[in-house]
Image (cartoon, rainbow, N blue to C red):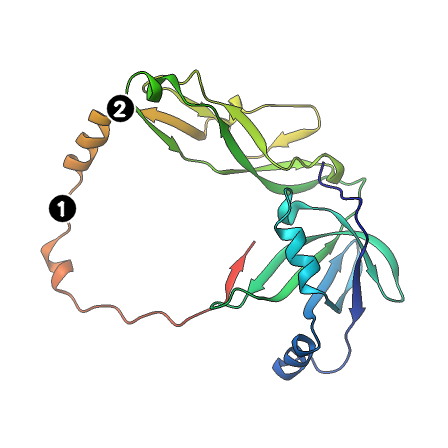
């Protein structure tokens, strides 16, 4: 379950012109700019402690963690992190988006898939394991969000695979991806080599073309 019992995250309302200078002043004060929205209420600009947010992002449930958010002057609400920006060089948090959560309403989130064990096709027959789908989108109540989904792959032989339909199902969550989407599979070394040989060579004209200009640097952003 993604709900934590830790102390509430405290957010201070922000006012004034929300430009680069404003954001810089917020960061100099030791906090980072944030926006809280959702639950049918107007978005609100706030400032939060980046250390507290970083701790949540690095927890077992990560950005799917649901926590108490106390906006000064507005009381407690349940919230989760839905978007964040990091400084591209040092990786420091620059900005986050927080969403108010209604605990009695279904929501969609992506949760990681963890493969458990060593497939027999790898252990006994020299096959190669490919982890194709590392996250899966689900729909459930906020209190039922799992930190991850464990999948036992020890029984996988050569040319066998695991699909979304094989993931652990329960009445509390609903999978939104295609049931036949491949999560993991075991292939033989011969098949891998054959695929490399069969791959078409890069056209010579492409090698002689001008190098593309480097893309401008941008803030790292994850959803």
Q: Circle 1 is placed at which residue position? A: 201
In the displayed structure image, the side of residue 147 where residue 136 appears, left or right: left
Q: Is residue 194 above or below residue 220?
A: above
Q: Which of the two discs, 1 and 2, sits closer to the camera?
A: 2
Q: Residue at x 53, y 68 (%)?
A: 87
Of residues 93 and 171, the one drawn nearer to the viewer in this rendering: 93
The location of residue 151, given as percent across then percent down, is 52, 25
Disc 1 and disc 2 in contact, CB within 8 angstroms: no
The local secondary structure at tag 1 comes to loop
The answer to which quarter of the image holds residue 55 is bottom right
Tell me the quadrant of the picture where the N terminus can be found: top right
Q: Circle 2 is placed at which residue position? A: 188
In the displayed structure image, the side of residue 206 where residue 74 appears, left or right: right
Q: Earlier in the sequence, mark 1 or mark 2?
A: 2
Q: CA–CA distance between discs 1 and 2? A: 23 Å
Q: Residue at x 66, y 35 (%)?
A: 146
The location of residue 89, given as percent across then percent down, is 47, 68
Q: Is residue 62 above or below residue 72?
A: above
The answer to which quarter of the image holds residue 60 is top right
In the displayed structure image, the side of residue 12 where residue 210 appears, left or right: left
The local secondary structure at tag 2 comes to loop
Within 10 Å of disc 2 (Cα), the crowding (few <14, some 14-19, many 20+) is: some
The location of residue 169, given as percent across then percent down, is 62, 23
């Amino acid at each position: 379950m993604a709900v934590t019992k830790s102390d509430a995250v405290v957010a201070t309302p922000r006012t004034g012109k929300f430009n680069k200078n404003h954001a810089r002043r917020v960061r100099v004060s030791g906090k980072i700019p944030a926006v809280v929205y959702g639950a049918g209420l107007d978005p609100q600009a706030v400032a939060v402690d980046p250390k507290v947010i970083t701790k949540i992002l690095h927890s077992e449930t990560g950005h799917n963690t649901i926590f108490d958010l106390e906006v000064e002057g507005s009381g407690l609400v349940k919230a989760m992190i839905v978007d964040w920006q990091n400084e591209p060089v040092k990786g420091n948090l620059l900005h986050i988006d927080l969403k108010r959560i209604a605990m009695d309403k279904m929501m969609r989130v992506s949760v990681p898939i963890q493969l458990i064990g060593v497939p027999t096709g790898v252990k006994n027959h020299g096959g190669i394991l490919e982890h194709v789908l590392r996250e899966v989108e689900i729909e459930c109540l906020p209190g039922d969000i799992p930190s991850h989904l464990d999948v036992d792959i020890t029984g996988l032989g050569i040319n066998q695979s695991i699909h979304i339909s094989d993931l652990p199902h329960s009445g509390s969550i609903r999978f939104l991806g295609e049931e036949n989407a491949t999560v993991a599979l075991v292939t033989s070394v011969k098949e891998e080599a054959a695929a490399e040989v069969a791959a078409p060579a890069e056209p010579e004209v492409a090698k002689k073309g001008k190098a593309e200009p480097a893309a401008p640097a941008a803030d790292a952003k994850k959803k």
